[in-house]
Image: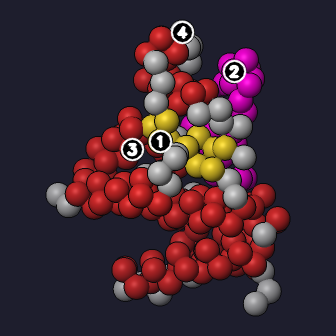
Amino acid sequence: MKLLLDTCVIYPTVMRQMLLGASRVTGWTPLWSERILEEWARAARKIGPTGEMQARAEIALVRATWPKSEISWVPSLETRLWLPDVNDRHILAAAIAGSADLLITSNARDFPRATLFEEGLDRLDPDALLLKAYNSYPDQVSSVGNDILFEARRLSGKDWEIRDLFKKARLPRLAKVMATAPG
């Protein structure tokens, strides 16, 4: 299954790491465009003077790990599209050009289902997608989550609990199921 990842699900680190980790486990193919990655880098400026540099380093790693995931398209594709926010048309264009099955976004309001259906797409929020991955591959997705938890503890020096970390990452349903899972 091909998943176009909106910038709003790539930029938060924990969410991105879970989505990419789940993609490895499930065999999903994540997709993005150069513009989506550039939006990520610009958004990272908000965290401080080194935020953009760190994001660009992470972008280079993502590109190296997923070399066939970056999508481009002819400009006429984007100009024919309509969305409530004209600045999101490039997201839909990337999904269409990449033959995505799903658009993964936290921004449901700006991607009306009827418009997506006309293009042969649907959307899903990252928490719902990751919950589906967990239900299909509980041990593997738990392993991905535990690796992210370990790294968050190491980098922050904080003794995170998985439920708190994933809730903060706007993945509340995944947080709940992983926190209550046996083992």
Q: Which three-letter amino acid code belongs to the residue tagged 2?
A: Glu
Q: Is residue 40 left or right of residue 160?
A: left
Q: Find the distance from the CA under tag 4 to the CA under tag 3.
A: 23 Å
Determine the secondary structure under disc 1. strand
Q: Is residue 103 visible?
A: yes
Q: Which three-letter amino acid code belongs to the residue tagged 1?
A: Glu
Q: Is residue 171 left or right of residue 1?
A: left
Q: Find the distance from the CA under tag 1 to the CA under tag 2.
A: 20 Å
Q: Is residue 85 visible?
A: no
| Label 4 CA crowd tier, 10 Å (few <14, some 14–19, many 20+) | few
Camera-nearest residue between 127 and 164: 127
Quadrant housing residue 101: top right
Tag 4–tag 3 contact (CB < 8 Å): no
Query: What residue does disc 2 label?
Result: 119
Determine the secondary structure under disc 2. loop
Residue in view at x 78 percent, y 58 percent: 132
Query: What residue does disc 4 label?
Result: 80
Of mark 4 and mark 1, the one earlier in the sequence is 1
Tag 2–tag 4 contact (CB < 8 Å): no
Q: Which three-letter amino acid code belongs to the residue tagged 3?
A: Leu
Task: Name above or below for residue 97 compared with residue 13.
Answer: above
Q: Find the distance from the CA under tag 2 to the CA under tag 3.
A: 23 Å
Which stretch appears magenta? 102-129
> x and y percent of residue 138 in the render?
78, 73
Q: Find the distance from the CA under tag 4 to the CA under tag 1.
A: 21 Å
Of mark 2 and mark 4, the one earlier in the sequence is 4
Query: Mark 1 or mark 2, which is nearer to you?
Result: 1
Query: Mark 3 or mark 1, which is nearer to you?
Result: 1
Query: What residue does disc 1 label?
Result: 70
Q: Find the distance from the CA under tag 2 to the CA under tag 4.
A: 12 Å
Query: What residue does disc 3 label?
Result: 37
Of mark 2 and mark 3, the one earlier in the sequence is 3
